[in-house]
Image (cartoon, rainbow, N blue to C red):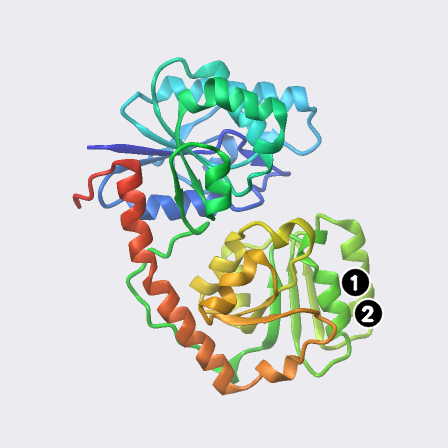
Amino acid sequence: MQRIVIADIKSYNNGGVCAGHYYAFASNYQQIFSKTCEVKIAGGPIYRKRFSDAELIPLPCDISEGQSKLKSFSRMIRNAKSLMRQTTPNDIIIIQQSKPAQILYSLIFTCWERRNIYHVEYSEEPMTRPYYRMAMHLRGKKILKGTLCPNEIVGKAYEMPYLVLPDYIYVSSNYNVTGNYQEKCYDFCTLGRIVHEKGISGVALALRGKPYRYLISGHAEDSSEVSIISQAAQECTNLTVHLDYLTDEQYEKMLNNSRYAILNYIGAYTEKSSGVVLDMLFHGVPIIGHRCRALKFVEDEHVGILYDDINTFDFASVLNEETYQECLIGIKNYLKRFSNDIEHLYRFLGVERIII
């Protein structure tokens, strides 16, 4: 039986919380391959909060906020060394994206035999750095067999075999996307980490005092954003703000209580793919988003509405049953296409799709 290892060499631990997409990515790929392969999740101690000992290949270290680059790098090398020791050349290893340069150097220092290692990359930016590019040409291409990436531009940048995939892949065969427009508590929501590039404060200011209910919920990572959002919400009954990490149960409840999710991406977020978008769609929530490269597919696939400027967008134009249901139909049709992505992933990794 083939074994697939989903590895997070960085294993980020922020005060006992693994923020970001790492758990979700590991769980998603675990679902994709669990019926045909033995699947293991490789991560540091923080991963014991989500996965059982039977599911894990334990790595020795977590990387915490505030650690020096040298200490973080030394811990990543220890994790990479442990990963190599606990796996074999026959295993298929998928390395989650985080700190690309440190991951590459960690593999260079610890991987001395031919392996089936693939890396996930969301941006071509690392290949613009001379030292990273040199390391990739001299050793990286001998270690890595291919790239999993969100678009052709990123794939071609790493100059090795690549497969274009969304950040998450819809695994369920249930495409019955339904939603009761009238029963929703919020017209719009934005959930997840609060950082400048998500443009959340801009949405809060645009909706402040308007006859629309807007929910903001997630861990605050940008103090200036939080300050603007908090001021906008003061003495304002239509904005609901919840500044804390969300449990899975809270996240799903808030999504299910919202008609639309607003993604007002700015800066770097306009160029890179985001698993947040897909997660919203997997929950049957249409997207209202800033028109940019990262969200272009929202318009192409009819799974939401894009705008050029949040301050001139007509929010009332989407708050009707007809527009909402049209978006749900688009989501249903979009989700059906993921079966092809799963087939392509199996072929790219050389995995036999024999259900056990």
Residue at the image point whose x is 77% and y is 55% from the top: 225
Amino acid type at mark 1:
Ser
Residue at the image point whose x is 49% and y is 80% from the top: 324
Q: Can I make out residue 240 in this image?
A: yes
* Closest to the observer, 302 or 319: 302
Dot 2 and dot 1 residues touching (CB under 8 Å): yes
From the viewer's perspective, tell me whether residue 336 is left or right of residue 123.
left
Q: Which residue is the site of mark 1?
A: 230
Q: Quadrant of the N terminus?
A: top left
Label 2 neighbour load within 10 Å: few <14, some 14-19, many 20+: few
In percent of width and height, residue 36 lies at 22, 42
From the viewer's perspective, tell me whether residue 306 is left or right of residue 144.
right
Q: Which residue is the site of mark 2?
A: 234
In percent of width and height, residue 228 lies at 81, 60
Residue at the image point whose x is 36% and y is 14% from the top: 113
From the viewer's perspective, tell me whether residue 143 is left or right of residue 33.
right
